Amino acid sequence: MSKYLVNLKINNMPIAVEEGTTILEAAKKLNFRIPTLCNHPDLTVAGNCRVCVVEVKGARLLAAACATPVSEGMEVLTNSEKVRIARKHIVELLLAEHNADCTKCFKNGHCELQDLSGEYRIGDHVFLDLVKPSSKIQDISSPSIVKDDSKCIRCQRCVRTCTELQGVSALGVVNKGDHQRISTFLNKPLHEVVCTNCGQCINRCPTGALTERNYIEEVWNALYNPSKFVVVQTAPATRIALGEDLGIQVGERVTGKMVAALKKLGFNKVLDTDFTADLTIMEEGTELLTRLKKALVDKDEKVVLPMMTSCSPGWIKFQEHMYPELLDNLSTCKSPQQMFGAVAKTYYADKINIKAQDMIVVSIMPCVAKKFECERPEMRDSGYQDVDYVLTTRELAMMIKQAGIDFDKLEDEHYDSILGESTGAAVIFGATGGVMEAALRTAYEIVTGREVPFTNLNIKPVRGMEGIKEASIKIKSVKPEWSFLEGVELNVAIAHGLANARKLMEKVRSGEASYHFIEIMGCPGGCLGGGGQPIPTSPEIRKKRAEAIYSEDLEMVIRKSHENPEVAEIYREFLGEPLGHKSHDLLHTHYKVRKRY
Amino acid sequence: MENNLKKVDIIFEIDEKQSPLAILEKTVKRPADEIILDLIDSGLKGRGGAGFPTGLKWKFTRNEDSEVKYVICNADEGEPGTFKDREIIDRVPEKIFAGMAICGFVIGAKEGYIYLRGEYNFLLKNLQKKLDEFNAGMKKTGIDFTIYIKSGSGAYVCGEESALFESMEGKRGEPRNKPPYPTVAGYNSKPTVINNVETLVYTTMICHMGPERFKALGTKDSRGSKVFSVSGDTPISGIYELELGMPLNEFVDGFGDGDTKAVQVGGASGHCVPRKKFNDTIIGFEGIPTGGSMMIFNSSRSMYNVLHDYLEFFTEESCGQCTPCRVGCQQLLKGIEAVKRGERPPAYLDDLKKLTATMKIAAKCGLGQSVGNPFNSIIDNFREEIIY
Ligand SMILES: Cc1cc2nc3c(=O)[nH]c(=O)nc-3n(C[C@H](O)[C@H](O)[C@H](O)COP(=O)(O)O)c2cc1C
Ligand code: SF4
Ligand code: SF4
Ligand code: SF4
Ligand code: SF4
Ligand code: FES
């Protein structure tokens, strides 16, 4: 159904746009930028900050451009005297409530409110200061997130994120009037509520009110400590986004530069989480095949299907709170980050002759939930905390800047060996559908001896940004030892963003769908849209990052996890076989039932 | 009340010969369009504050194409100094029900809701009893309409129609963006007529007595009569139904205590009229409209305290979502305190007046938009009282 065109004028320039277009969108088409704060491309319209107000000729009120659809014959002024005065007032009012100590703020230089007040050069402080001393007490209960109400402008982007995208509703608006604020259930600390630590709210907070717990100083201290051997691992999705915070355009891969920068920062070894992503595929793929065998051949009633991936710690905590009855569906595999930590402080430490207690493992992650994950008591299988510090992609960019490294000019360097080799299958872990695709590439080949029947290994049906994806693969001409899978139609499903995960879980719980394998990533788009990735985020940005990931995959020499030579080596030298005794001790974990409130 | 004020008896009039249910039965036999024409002809405008022509509101909603539509009676009466809806609910509830059912017939709705102010829960038992009888009566006569009561959340802003819908839907009572308007997307995003208690009673009565008797009252822009809640420095506070369009001096002659210095017309969000302007102020849509509240202040009152109370009220009752209102209200309140204490110069009041101009055009709903009414009218007329 094609939509009507609506004719209007913006700043006296005529334009025709589709019915339902907002004034904000129409103005953008004419290259008039209208400032916004509460508006976000991923979220429903709120229209509460009011900085986007514009004048509509003949109307008594100014219109919020983000919330007002165009109408025929409308004449809009985006910078009239009335508009300017109102907009300036609104920014002044926001600042009156705001603890504007920019120089000490983590968001300094990356803050939408700061940018806006900079544009309006608000220096004369007409209005009274209203910052409540109590609002300055930060909530630092969570190992992932810091909440600072004194920097909150009540735009509710976080609330909409947590509800609309994540289906968690850990944050909500409480009280009214001058006491209105963003809070949790019963005003409890974030660590004690259903917050999954996904960090999506951080990615959409326009100010410094929600930020990651940063561990930059701790990591510098470790690097400067001569008695410590500091190794760093980098997650798949960091290499396609780090550049955004360092002046490089969205969608440009910076793998080699990132490695070079990490070496310059002084890490003793620069290794790759992609290696343990491949390892994850070996373990998880085997786990899936084992479960299928138990279910189909042994008719074991205890075996639980569908199996669900477990690499996304925000998703894991979500499941522990929301669907504890489905915890047995989760793969017991640790996330690649935690597999890495456990292997680094055992196998690797031995190989390079470093005592585990002298080793510090730092992760560079697109994620803030991983900060929580590394502190879970289950994650100490090496005898020490397996991963010591988790930095977000953003924090790494800050360290690179602090060190005075001219990132753009760096020559590409390679990961150290061992634990630095990886495959295309590992890289695509960073995109929604990637783990599924990597697992299928390997599992199909194990079972049939042939490559997956998709052109160039690209399993297109599991790719893309649709919230929930489903696919079926018919398994044919299997090897004799897998004969029970002959002719089986393998049903898989993929969800990203926890609101979609919830929808899928409801289907599973009600028995409406019968899948064998489900991939869930806690963040929209998968890790490439993780809570620790450069800000801003939007559907377009995530699309470009995904393209970068898939092009990295295409360029890799090896594109199937089971062909990673270092993976073969670790099984030969140390682990034995997937799901073996050592694997069980180091690479697998268990989950915990958590309360819903 | 020995004066020119014309007392009217429409709202509370009890006609022994024709019950509200009978009026309803009679009315639904007429073509819906004719009823709308009568309402438009009567000149009835909404009595909840905004004054939108009721006949048009019904017409727009009738014209919407939707299986499901709703009629909602706004009984959230929270404006300080207003207590007329309470009296109407208590004394003539059947007339409200009849108005809702007529509206349902006209627009094509099968469900009606009364959103009753939380503080009026003491009226609930009696109201529910009368409602059950009325619902049963409608059922018996084959009128396919059912009315329910929803208890309010206790926030003033929930009287604002879109916040009221949010609240009814179980969400936080925050006003919505407009458009869409309720006639297109109201409760549950369906076309909805929302009317004030008093408005609905007038619709019943206009259907009963025809538009002529109503039209004969009032002025060109303010047809008919209205129920006033008179309070403050008056020996005869209470509820009075009076003809619209009266000059304020006549009102003061009738209700004042002989020492009236100002009248706050329209409650906290209304305008303050000082004595010197009584003679040329008309109470009605062409002059100063009111949802019913008339607060009379004599010379013993401090207008600083009056304004301070109002601003405290708005500072607390703002839903807090939009910047101009949430922060603006606090600035106005803290601002007059600062001027009073000498921490800011008197000229700061002019900065604050400019701020109210922004609030008036940039706030998201009527609450924030109208805080400037009491602020400016009190500052302009009683500036010395605020400063010294
Ligand atoms: C803050 C605020 C509070 C309001 N409270 C009420 C109320 O208590 N009762 C009411 O009828 N209308 C109230 N209104 C007006 C309603 O939004 C709406 O205009 C009215 O219910 C429409 O009915 P009417 O056309 O019959 O007047 C309020 C408006 C605002 C902005
Ligand atoms: S949130 Fe923004 S404006 Fe506020 S202190 Fe931080 S950088 Fe400055
Ligand atoms: S981190 Fe995720 S779950 Fe926690 S409050 Fe933010 S959006 Fe909600
Ligand atoms: S915490 Fe951030 S996103 Fe949430 S309301 Fe405050 S400023 Fe907006
Ligand atoms: S004007 Fe006030 S009450 Fe209305 S939406 Fe804004 S903050 Fe809420
Ligand atoms: S961006 Fe439009 S109101 Fe906030």
Image (cartoon, helix red, strand yellow):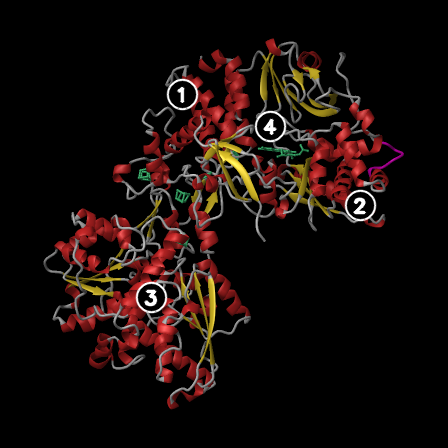
Residue drawn 72% across the image and 25% down it: B226
Q: Taking B64 as reference, is A556 left or right?
A: left
Residue receiving disc 3:
A428
For the residue carrying disc 1, how many other residues have a C-alpha within 10 Å: few (<14), some (14-19), or many (20+)? some
Closest to the camera, between mark 3 and mark 2, is: 3
Q: Secondary structure at mark 1?
A: helix
Q: Residues within 10 Å of mark 2 (few under 14, many from 20)?
A: few
Distance in Å between CA atoms under marks 4 and 1: 25 Å
Q: Which mark is residue B133?
A: 2
Q: Are marks 1 and 3 on the same chain?
A: no
Mark 2: amino acid: Glu
Q: Residues within 10 Å of mark 3 (few under 14, many from 20)?
A: many
Residue B19 part of the magenta-drawn span: yes
Q: Earlier in the sequence, mark 1 or mark 2?
A: 2
Amino acid at the residue labelled 3: Ile
Residue drawn at 83 percent across, 42 percent down: B28
In this picture, which residue range is highlighted in magenta? Answer: B15-20
